Image (spheres, rainbow, N blue to C red):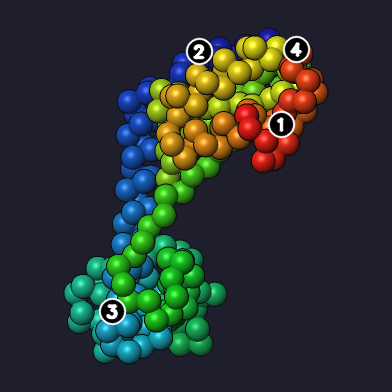
Amino acid sequence: MATTTQRPTGAADPQLTALMARQTQLAEAIERRAAEVVRAWLLDHHRTWVAVDFTKTRPEPPFDGDDGLTAAVGKLPRRAFGCGLDVRGSFIVRLADLNGYLGRLHDDQGPAKQQPRIELVIVRDPDGGTDAAMFLDGAELADGDVSEYVIDAGRGHVYRDWIESRDCVVESASPAAAELLRVSYDYPPGHQYIDGAPEGWPLEDGEDR
């Protein structure tokens, strides 16, 4: 009986993985900038659309001689080309589609304000802990770059330890996060599960803490 030999599989090279992630980010940045350039061209020429050759590499005449427009058209993202070829065999790039892609209003001619894309993936183990991973603009942040605060009154805390934990995280957090943390620790959901809390805690709104 013939047997097959499987080659051992190893972990991906970390440097290659990081370079590939940067390549993806660069490609996305190029597509976005191309959309901004074409959008600016449409606004400057008081147009709401431009026809593009079926190869998606150049605008149709009479604008095929515009080198700047041609360079940008060739780098547009797929979603900028609408619903496919028209009856003449051309793609139509519409201002409305670019506005939607860029998240702009029709009459907004100011510079693009790019909001960071933040993604948080939380995996909860009912019988264990919680793992969280954060991504900023598509790139995962290292553990050392993220400050994670978990407030869970139902995990068997003692009041004294609870208050010490509050003071520690409030001191280390940014001012905005510190205020939310302070309120969350002082008025936690499930506070009845914290052992050793003084009578009347948490205080009602308006009472002195």
Residue positioned 33% across, 82% down in the render: 42
- Within 10 Å of the Cα at label 1, are there few (<14), some (14-19), or many (20+) other Cα atoms? few
Lateral position of residue 49 relative to residue 40, left or right: right
Lateral position of residue 29 relative to residue 177, left or right: left
- Rendered position, 34 above or below 117: below
Residue at which label 4 appears: 196
Q: Report x, y in % for residue 127.
A: 76, 16
Identify the amino acid type marked 4.
Answer: Gly
For the residues labelled 4 and 3, the Cα–Cα distance comes to 67 Å
Which sits in the foreground, 139 or 110? Answer: 110
Residue at which label 3 appears: 41
Identify the amino acid type marked 2.
Answer: Pro
Quadrant of res 145:
top left
- Dot in front, 1 or 4: 1
Query: Of the residues under marks 1 and 4, which one precedes in the sequence?
Result: 4
For the residues labelled 2 and 4, the Cα–Cα distance comes to 55 Å
Labelled pair 3, 1 in contact (Cβ < 8 Å)? no
Residue at which label 2 appears: 8
Q: Report x, y in % for residue 36.
A: 33, 68
For the residues labelled 3 and 1, the Cα–Cα distance comes to 60 Å
Which sits in the foreground, 137 or 84? Answer: 137
- Within 10 Å of the Cα at label 2, are there few (<14), some (14-19), or many (20+) other Cα atoms? few
Residue at which label 1 appears: 203
Query: Of the residues under marks 2 and 4, which one precedes in the sequence?
Result: 2
Residue positioned 38% across, 45% down in the render: 24
Lateral position of residue 187 relative to residue 97, left or right: right
Quadrant of res 39:
bottom left
Query: Of the residues under marks 4 and 3, which one precedes in the sequence?
Result: 3
- Rendered position, 130 above or below 53: above
Q: Which mark is residue 5?
A: none
Kindly state the secondary structure of the residue where label 3 is placed.
helix
Q: Report x, y in % for residue 8.
A: 50, 13
